[in-house]
């Protein structure tokens, strides 16, 4: 039985005729850069695929998604898809390629964008089209904050909202300056643990401190800067903190 090899010859012919795709589009939302769009790729490759009797069949293999937050506080859906593309020839021969696409959107288009990215790179890589491209659907670059920073920001916002008698701005500046002087190498977690010990309740953010608690914390920390606090680390008692 004769082995059909039309797809190999056809793809080689496409590569021979394929021209470079210029970066003619500009992204100005979130970042500034030039890029090649998916439509640029389609417009360049489609006539050659038709001429050499090649068609492409997509198959979604995997899809994952998660919600993220931009630095501006907007919610974004981040979708990653694993796609398999079958490059088939009219004679029945075919080859396959797998690519990953990742994209984000504030609405319901993240999956479509991810699939477009995967398809674009499958074409660019299969036919070795020169490119230094970046992810481009809608030509928007989003700056995401880390999950840890998102959690901290939400904790601070919640603490501030639930505090009926928050510390003053002057107290805040004094507190931060004193903490920096008393605990210069301490992590955020260590500082919050110290604040919790002083006010005798769990503190997840300095925004949760009331005026009275802020005043007490500042007094306790400033006392540690006094000579007796260095000479006798046990000099501060519960009475000193009341």
Image: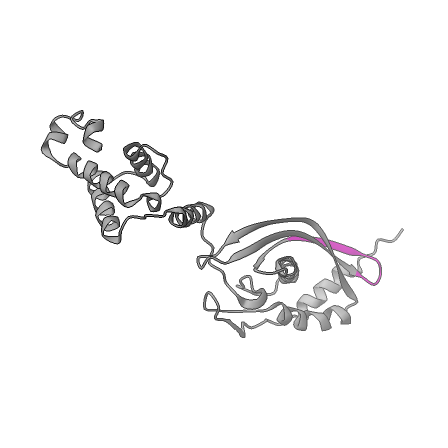
Using the image, determine if residue 33 lies above or below residue 231. Answer: below
- Total tally of numbered discs in the picture: 0
Using the image, determine if residue 93 lies above or below residue 186. Answer: below
Closer to the camera in the image, 163 or 63: 163
Q: Is residue 7 left or right of residue 162?
A: right
Closer to the camera in the image, 232 or 184: 232
Closer to the camera in the image, 236 or 116: 236
Magenta range is: 89-99
Quadrant of the rendering where the C terminus is positioned: top left
Q: Is residue 35 left or right of residue 156?
A: right
Report which quarter residue 241 is drawn in.
Answer: top left
Closer to the camera in the image, 36 or 213: 213
- x, y percentage for residue 176? 25, 46
Q: Look at the image and say whether residue 2 sits in the magenta stretch.
A: no
Considering every residue shown, the one lying at the far right of the view is: 1
- x, y percentage for residue 5? 80, 57
Considering every residue shown, the one lying at the far bottom of the view is: 24
The residue shown at (37%, 47%) is 163
Using the image, determine if residue 202 lies above or below residue 64. Answer: above
Report which quarter residue 91 is drawn in.
Answer: bottom right
The residue shown at (64%, 52%) is 81
Considering every residue shown, the one lying at the far left of the view is: 227
The residue shown at (61%, 65%) is 129
How are the residues colored?
Answer: one colour
- x, y percentage for residue 2? 87, 53
Q: Is residue 175 left or right of residue 16?
A: left
- x, y percentage for residue 75? 53, 56
Report which quarter residue 227 is drawn in.
Answer: top left
Q: Is residue 33 left or right of residue 11?
A: left
Overall secondary structure of the magenta section: strand
């Amino acid at each position: 039985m004769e082995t059909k090899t039309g797809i190999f010859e056809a793809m080689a012919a496409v590569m021979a005729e394929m021209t470079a795709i210029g970066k003619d589009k500009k992204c100005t939302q979130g970042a500034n850069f030039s890029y090649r769009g998916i439509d640029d790729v389609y417009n360049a490759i489609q006539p050659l695929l038709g001429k050499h009797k090649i068609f492409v069949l997509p198959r979604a293999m995997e899809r994952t998604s998660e919600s993220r937050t931009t630095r501006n506080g907007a919610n974004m859906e981040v979708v990653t898809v694993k796609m398999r593309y079958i490059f088939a020839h009219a004679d029945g021969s075919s080859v396959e390629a797998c690519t990953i696409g990742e994209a984000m959107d504030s609405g319901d288009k993240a999956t479509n964008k991810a699939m477009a990215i995967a398809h674009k790179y499958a074409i660019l890589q299969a036919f070795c089209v020169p490119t230094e491209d970046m992810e481009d659907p809608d030509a928007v670059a989003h700056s995401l904050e880390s999950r840890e920073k998102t959690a901290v920001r939400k904790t601070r916002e919640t603490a501030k909202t639930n505090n009926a008698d928050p510390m003053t701005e002057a107290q805040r500046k004094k507190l931060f300056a004193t903490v920096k002087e008393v605990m210069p190498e301490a992590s955020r977690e260590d500082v919050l643990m110290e604040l919790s010990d002083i006010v005798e309740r769990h503190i997840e953010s300095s925004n949760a401190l009331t005026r009275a608690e802020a005043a007490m914390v500042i007094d306790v920390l400033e006392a540690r800067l006094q000579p007796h606090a260095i000479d006798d680390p046990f000099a501060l008692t519960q009475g000193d903190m009341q």
